[in-house]
Amino acid sequence: MIRIVVAEDHKLVRRSIRYLLDASGEIEVVGEAENGADAVSLAEQLKPDLIVMDIAMPRQDGITATKRIQELELPTQVLILSIYDNRALVQQALKSGARGYVLKRALTAELLPAIRQVNQGGTYLSLGLVERRENPPEGGYGIQGQE
């Protein structure tokens, strides 16, 4: 069972993500946060395997919260969720320590594969973020064995 905290400031989106994860049968949602500061606090308390973190939240954004989790040297991985497909923002998220970046428009198709990939030590980028190739894989691109 993969233990996850969902950090998303919009309650309806947070509940939808939780529903999707609970229905998978392989994930246990152990906490919910509505801002980055609370996500960091829950990471310290619960030490989940992974945090599904919105990039734009009040009190502390997802990138700052991800940096803070990395500074605390917690065993928790971070998967960023965002409506923004700006490459500079993606690079900033990955430099902060995030192991993946999923576009919200692809949430239903890509969230579970992204969680599996990141949980296995890889990196995941939404299909909409990478250059298209002739026969792209279903969903996004997983990169196994990144640092």
Image (cartoon, rainbow, N blue to C red):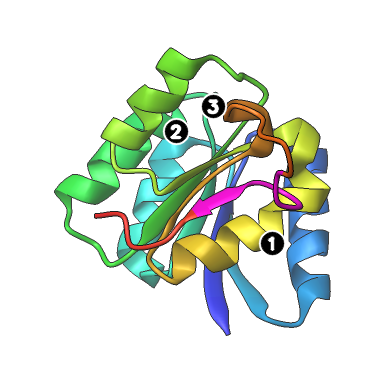
Which residue has dot 2 on it? Answer: 62
Looking at the image, can residue 13 be seen? yes
Q: In this view, does 23 lie to the left or right of 102?
A: right
Residue 124: x, y in percent?
Answer: 51, 49
Q: How far apart are marks 2 and 3 (CA)?
A: 7 Å
The picture places residue 29, in percent across and down from the top left corner, at: 63, 69
Horizontal side of residue 91 vs 16, given as left or right: left
SS label for mark 3? loop
Residue 138: image x %, image y %? 76, 52
Residue at left 38%, top 43%?
98
Callout 3, which amino acid? Met
125 relative to 117, above or below = above
* Residue 125's disc number: none
Can you tell which quarter of the image residue 64 is in? top left
| Mark 3 lies on residue | 57
Q: CB of mark 2 within 8 Å of CB of mark 3? A: yes
* Snapshot quadrant of residue 11: top right
Query: Mark 3 against mark 1, which lies toward the viewer?
Result: 1
Give the mark nearest the N terminus, 1 or 2: 2
State which region is magenta: 136-142
Which residue lies under the disc numbered 1?
A: 112
Quadrant (top left, top right, bottom left, bottom right) of the N terminus: bottom right
129 over 49 or under it: above or below: above
